[in-house]
Amino acid sequence: MPWAKPWSNSPPHKRNEPPRTVARPGGTPLAVVLALLAPAALTLAGCLPDFGGTGTTATTGEDTPGNHAARPAGGAEEAPPAITAWDDLPDSFLPHRDFTLTLGDLRELLAGESSRIAETILESPQEFLGLMGKALEMPRDLFVLVDKETPLPADYVPRDLVDLTKYQDRLTLNREGLSLRKILMPDLLAMVEEAAREGVILDLSSTYRSYAYQEWLFQYWVDRIGQERAERSSARPGSSQHQLGTAIDFGSVTGPFAEHPAGRWLAEKGWRYGFSLSYPQGYEDVTGYIYEPWHFRYISRPGTRLERFFFDGIQQYFLEFWDRREPFFRERYHSTSPSRW
């Protein structure tokens, strides 16, 4: 992502009982009438795609991009086959009301992506675009790609850094001088509080690092373990996500943290609060770094849902896609819905 992009213009940031049925004068229960009319009303309102006939419509669940209800088994008078898959829709179909983007446009764009990612997106394009719209409303620098090939400028310093000692009554800090960007604090505090309610303490060990500090730290590891090993476990100055002010090292900052209660909790639930594991196990050839179960980067709640549902749960895949394709989607995004985030 070019650094000439105008980040300053980013968008702001009783007991269970069976239901009662009210009968209509004609004998048809009102609940049945409503059930029959509701999908059509939603389609007319633009909330759901109309697949025709009695086909299914897309619904959204928390842990999957879309739950598509199976059509009932055919009876003696089964209706003609209905369109039930996005693959059956024409290229001219508009999959989401917030984008001036046809299904054909999306198919053409994704032809240049990996087949697995393209197929996943095209199976649930409405859910994908809905999350993309929410992500586009977030500050752009939350998604900036930072790795060995795309370093940050030496003079980059986040504008909204806050001293974490202000939150020391709510956070467990393992050292002095820790700071993070203000934008992630509500989700961080909510995550820490939820973990505490479940008996897990999330302690913070490393947060924002300046370019100069990272320069010293990388050289320290080179001197201690040699350049080859240092390159796999420590970032060169400018290539560290910590310079963004949105990355956190939790706990011991060692491999065994993966089996610590805090490590297991973060791996399972951190995404719900916008925190993504940056360097997962078995992906050193993708990320450039060894497995770091302690290192999480905040990419917002829409971001972690995109990553989890459409990019195999791999942050690097999502951020590389965003780096290539964000201008394409932003140009075609015209929100008609209030943000939930």
Image (spheres, rainbow, N blue to C red):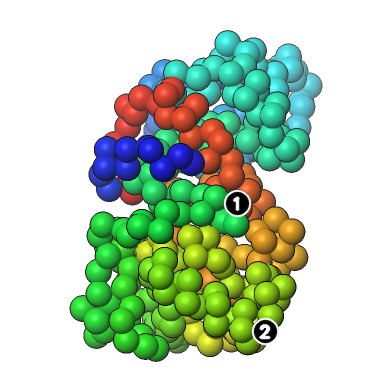
Type of amino acid at the residue the image marks with label 2? Ile
Task: Name which residue lies at 26% across and 57% down.
Answer: 159
* Nearest to N terminus: mark 2 or mark 1: 1
For residue 202, side relative to residue 58 (left or right): left
Residue 212, above or below 61:
below
Residue 255 drawn at (x, y percent): 65, 83
Kindly tell me whether residue 54 is visible in this rendering.
no
| Vertical relation: 337 (above or below) 65 | above
Q: Quadrant of residue 232?
A: bottom right
Q: CA distance from mark 2 to mark 1?
A: 23 Å
125 with respect to 245 (left or right) = right
- Residue 65 placement (x, y as % from top left): 58, 44
Q: Is residue 100 visible?
A: yes
Residue ID for mark 2? 225
Mark 2 touching mark 1, by CB under 8 A? no
Q: Nearer the viewer, residue 326 or 115?
A: 326
Outermost left residue = 166
**Secondary element at tag 1:** loop
* Residue at the spot 76% in from the left edge and 32% down from the top edge: 73
Instruction: Tell me which residue sits at (58%, 18%) in the image.
Output: 105
Q: Residue 182 at x, y = what percent?
A: 27, 62
Q: Is 226 placed above or below 67 here?
A: below
Horizontal placement of 48 versus 285: left or right?
left
Nearest the eye: 78 or 214: 214
Q: Residue at coordinates 28% horizontally, 77% vertically from top-left?
A: 164
The residue that mark 1 highlights is 149
- SS state under label 2: helix
Q: For mark 1, does the 10 Å Cα neighbourhood hold few (<14), some (14 to 19), or many (20 or more) residues?
A: few
